[in-house]
Amino acid sequence: MRHEAPPGSVSSSGKRVHGKASLVRTRRVKVDPENPAEEVIKDAAHVIGSGGLVAFPTETVYGLGADALNPDAVMRVFRVKGRPPDNPLIVHVADPDSVYLLASEVPRVADLLIERFWPGPLTLVLKRTEMVPPVTSAGLDTVAVRMPAHAVPLALIRTAGTPIAAPSANRSGSPSPTTADHVMRDLEGEIELVLDGGPTEIGVESTVLDVTVEPPEVLRPGGLPVEEIERVIGSVRVPDWARGLERYASRPRAPGMKYRHYAPKARLVLVEGRPQDVRYRVQELVNEFTSKGIRVGVLTTDGKRYENATTVDLGPSWDLRAVARSLFSSIRALDESGVDVVVAEGVEERGMGLAIMNRLRKASGGEIVYV
Ligand code: AMP
Ligand code: MG
């Protein structure tokens, strides 16, 4: 069902929809993340089959899905996200063998990784076949493929009978959604259906690994730690820009790397260094800002307290999985609390820490204080 609404109109749930025309009534439907009901999946598959857009939970973040083989549907994904057309989408499959339809070459390392880590938070970049529409791959001769470890997308892909292209279900540039609420906030009035399967388990996006080069190169650190990949295939390259250190970029950046990402509306300042120095410098920064009447939020770990700031604890620094799980929702929460600046503590760059630091550095837009 479609209905027109004037710019700045209020949607059915009473929220403003980006101050522009809302064209679609977005249905939000609860789904059991472990045992999705058949009728819910059939409904969603029907939307996908008719070229519509469905947001769904995965084990990483919520995805915004379209039929990967339908160029018009895929084009709509770019449009509703406000995503630059040169930033390709990940194609999601429901069984490992589908990779042979989408990829023209599957090197041995890819087979080893698929065998060990699929389904899971690992995306492989491979040479693509003609089956993949150019728009899905942003005109590149490669395609990014992943098999998610979540019953909802797996059932949806199987029932729709097509691979599903799905970037994160947020407006381009804002933090990725880890709940259906986040999706509604960004995309209500733009997409047909949101499947609400509760908060996501990992909380950051998949690790993207380019296996068309030797040694394979990490294009984006994510839910699968690089150390685990290296245990299976040996050393991989992690370029400095993939750590989020854009100023060290030595060659044209990978697609999508040149945009500010994961960012709150507030300015975000990241403080990196030894924990005791970081703690001291964060409080100093808070004091400097508040003395100028600027409202400050702090992203901390280990339950540390700061004076004169709205502080959100991401979790224990020894449990970086917990920190990753709460990262994006905490950034969104601080934004909602109305702070002008977020000061974030850096974490150790091991395991999930690499993905966390990539997101924080990108969210900071380069405003990093080294102590
Ligand atoms: P998102 O789906 O929003 O989490 O973003 C997908 C990520 O995968 C982006 O960082 C893309 O640049 C990357 N990606 C997707 N397809 C390719 C590809 N063919 N080559 C390189 N990177 C890709
Ligand atoms: Mg994204």
Image (cartoon, rainbow, N blue to C red):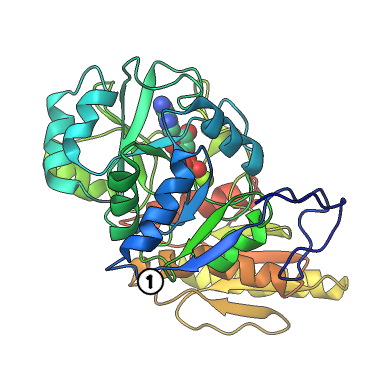
Q: Position of residue 47 (x, y in %)?
A: 48, 47
338 relative to 188, above or below:
below
Specify whether residue 256 is in view.
no
**For mark 1, what is the residue?**
322
Disc 1 residue type (three-letter): Ala
Q: Quadrant of residue 317?
A: bottom left
297 relative to 208, above or below:
below
Q: Residue at x 24, y 24 (%)?
A: 101
168 relative to 331, above or below:
above
Q: Residue at x 88, y 73 (%)?
A: 293
The front one of 101 and 29 is 29
Q: Position of residue 234 (x, y in %)?
A: 15, 36
Q: Is residue 178 left or right of residue 174?
A: left
Can you tell me which quadrant of the image ligand 1 is in? top left
The front one of 277 and 263 is 263
Q: Residues within 10 Å of mark 1 (few under 14, many from 20)?
A: some
Q: Quadrant of residue 311?
A: bottom right
Q: Position of residue 12 (x, y in %)?
A: 73, 67
Q: Is residue 312 left or right of residue 129?
A: right
Check the image and name the residue furthest to the front.
1
Q: In what element is the residue under mark 1? A: helix
